[in-house]
Amino acid sequence: MKLRPLLPLLGLGLLCGCTVGPHFTPPKGPAPKAYLGRADLPLPRSLRLNTTKSIAQNWWTTFRNPKLNQLIGEALKANPGIAAARARLAEASEAVNVAEGAMLPELGLAGTIGRQKYGAALFGPANFKIPPFTYYSVGPSLQFPLDIFGGQRRRLEEQKALARYRVFELDATLLSVAAEVTAQSFALAATGAQLHTLDAIIAADRRDVGLVRIARKAGSANRTELLSAESQLAEDRTLLPPLLEEESSARHGLAILLGKPPSEFTAPSFRLADFSLPRTLRLSVPSALARQRPDILAARAQLHAASAAIGVATSNLYPQIDLTANVMQEALTPGGLFNSAAAAWSLAANLSQPLFDGGQLSARRRAAIDGYKVALAHYHATILAAFAQVSDRLEALANDAKEVRAQLRATRISIASRNLARRSYSVGYTGILSVIDAERQTARAELGLTRAKAKQLMDIAALYEALGAPKLATRVGSTPGANPVK
């Protein structure tokens, strides 16, 4: 009999299994069967595509450069952007804990001491007066929100989805930093190689100027030939400042990526010849791209959060019911708190249902639905952009292979032509202008070959970035105490 008043409340509790709002199912995005419309890519024999194996998490080791491996390892630990991403992940993890805690009963202990004076109107016409008195109370209180329509569960679902988004955001940041360190290292090596080539070219120009001056004194060269030689030297010298600027920019970029000021960073002495092309390029099949690329997974997590937000907004349209219970000891003296007569308790169910709010709740639900549509469009756009980037990199690698072959051939021909021109000039068969022109062609070919090789390496790194390294955050370690994904 004593439990009969609780039966309606127990009945309400049985309704808590209802959850309004859509149940999230990952939508089917664009899923092409191939990255390119054609399967034949004219890649060099040293670069073989392999779709039977997934991309390695530490893909940068395929360039076989220990200095690069060490540099990326330091950047993944010290980069400020990665530190910020880890902090955002920890923050999202605590938001999940808050949402989980909101679904549990809240138990508190309260104590009160006060002074009270009631007015004569308290008892109406009886005109009964109560003198001022001091009162004391102490006891626990329990509050439990009945999540009848699943608003709290949807809010927890939303926070977990946002936490997963932060995990994938961290993955994307780690991948981006690794790719940027790799690209800046290639740039540093490429500018170093070009500066070395240019130094040799300028030294050759000086020799040519010296030869013309000797020939002019001997009467076998004129002023026009001397001006041509000096003009070539001056023209080649103008190539130095832009290369020096590129080198310093790459060096400073590496310093920032490693979380250091440029003045306190000494870049490794990278040489272009120290980087090897990967023996095999692991190319994920198109169907696996959406399951491993972090920005796609992050967009899907945002879409999940937007779906859960619809459920939260929908539940707010329905009645909200809270259970409260209090067990108190109330007395007019501190010693009276421990008497059995001071015991008091209350049990209540509080119901609130908005009747008129100016359409705010309905508007918020419509806004949540529109937000889901925005997230859905963003999800599809992210997938399309990912496939476009992989396709671009594959096409770039095919063109890089053609360019490297063409530059190698041009370099061999120009070197042979330059050597022939120098021999002809030394025996008096040709003039210095032929030597100068041959030197110019050789310089262009050697610099072009260096740039082509550097671009090939950079495009390989960009392809790895476009494919996405799966679960990179798990490999390098996540924030201590963060456990948002369940």
Image: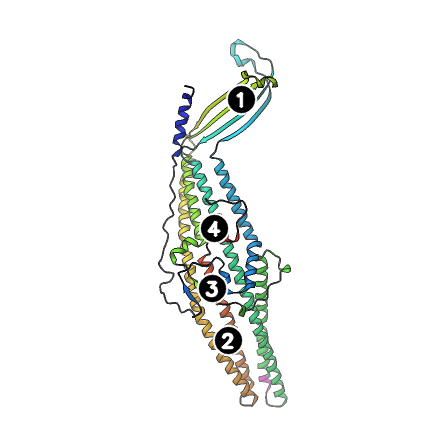
- Badge 4 crowding class, 10 Å Cα cut-off, few under 14, some 14 to 19, many 20 or more, is many
Q: Is residue 279 above or below residue 436?
A: above
Residue 460: mark in rendering = 3
Secondary structure, mark 1, is: strand
Which residue position holds label 1? 328
Please tell me which residue lies in front, 443 or 85: 85
- Badge 3 crowding class, 10 Å Cα cut-off, few under 14, some 14 to 19, many 20 or more, is many
User: Tag 2 or tag 4, which sits nearer the N-term?
Assistant: 4
The residue lying at 46 percent from left, 54 percent from top is 470
Please tell me which residue lies in front, 132 or 196: 196
Q: CA distance from mark 2 to mark 1?
A: 92 Å
Residue 40: mark in rendering = none
Residue 445: mark in rendering = 2
* Residue type of the residue flagged with mark 4: Phe
Occupied quadrant, residue 258: bottom right
Q: CA distance from mark 4 to mark 3?
A: 23 Å
Which residue position holds label 4? 168
User: Tag 1 or tag 4, which sits nearer the N-term?
Assistant: 4
The residue lying at 51 percent from left, 54 percent from top is 174
Span colored in magenta: 220-225
Secondary structure, mark 3, is: helix
* Residue type of the residue flagged with mark 3: Ile
* Residue type of the residue flagged with mark 2: Ala
Residue 457 placement (x, y as % from top left): 49, 66
Q: Quadrant of the N terminus?
A: top left
User: Tag 1 or tag 2, which sits nearer the N-term?
Assistant: 1
Is 41 in the magenta? no
Mark 4 touches mark 3? (CB < 8 Å)? no
